[in-house]
Amino acid sequence: MKIILKEDVSGLGYKDDVVEVKDGYGRNYLIPYGKAVIATPSALKVLAENQRQRAHKLAKIKADAEALAASLKDVKLTIGAKTSATGTIFGSVNSIQIAEALEKLGFNIDRKIIEIEPVKEVGEYTATVKLHKEVTAQVPFEVIAE
């Protein structure tokens, strides 16, 4: 089944992408929750016209995302966490803590666009921030014992 995404869906695509999904996923989840519409010929024509009209706005959004990525390139975060004697963290460091640390530095970034691997030990790691569908930034961070 071909569908047009109305919003970004992690692991599937971005807003206004035309993607192929299984019928059950489209009919039982994406369409009822308002995340997609069926890609009929008329819906595809409307999508093409909307994309043509938004082309200059999208260029500005991408330029802003690239500027933010360039400013994030020089950022180095330090996250404090409670640890055991062996250096294992009680719990884990997640995207919420990364977003809060970035906010303290003046970057207002939503936690939902930050992706990190599970962090269970003290050390240095890298978080990926997806600012735009074509622009990502790597933010290094260090987890230290409190």
Image (cartoon, grey):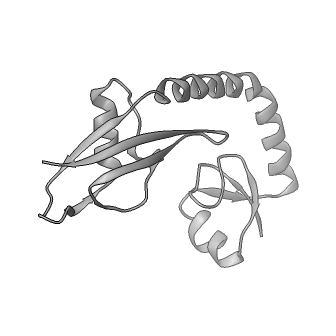
Q: Quadrant of the N terminus?
A: bottom right
Pinpoint residue 36: horizontal percent, then vertical percent: 65, 57
Residue found 59% across the figure and 50% down from its top: 8
Residue 6's spot in the image, x, y percent?
63, 49
- Residue 92 placement, left or right of 47: left
Could you tell me how many numbered marks the image carries?
Answer: 0
> In the rendered image, which quarter is residue 119 located in?
bottom left
- Residue at image coords 80%, 42%: 46
From the top left corner, tell me how far across and down residue 146 is, in percent. Answer: 12, 48
Residue at the extreme front of the image, as rendered: 86
Q: Position of residue 82 (x, y in %)?
A: 14, 55
Residue ID at (31%, 31%): 103
Q: In the figure, 142 relative to 109: above or below?
A: below
Q: Specify whether 112 is left or right of 58.
A: left
Residue 105 lies, with reference to residue 16, above or below; the image says above
Return the residue nearer the eye: 73 or 37: 73
In the picture shown, does residue 71 fall above or below 16? above
Residue placed most toward the observer, 135 or 123: 123
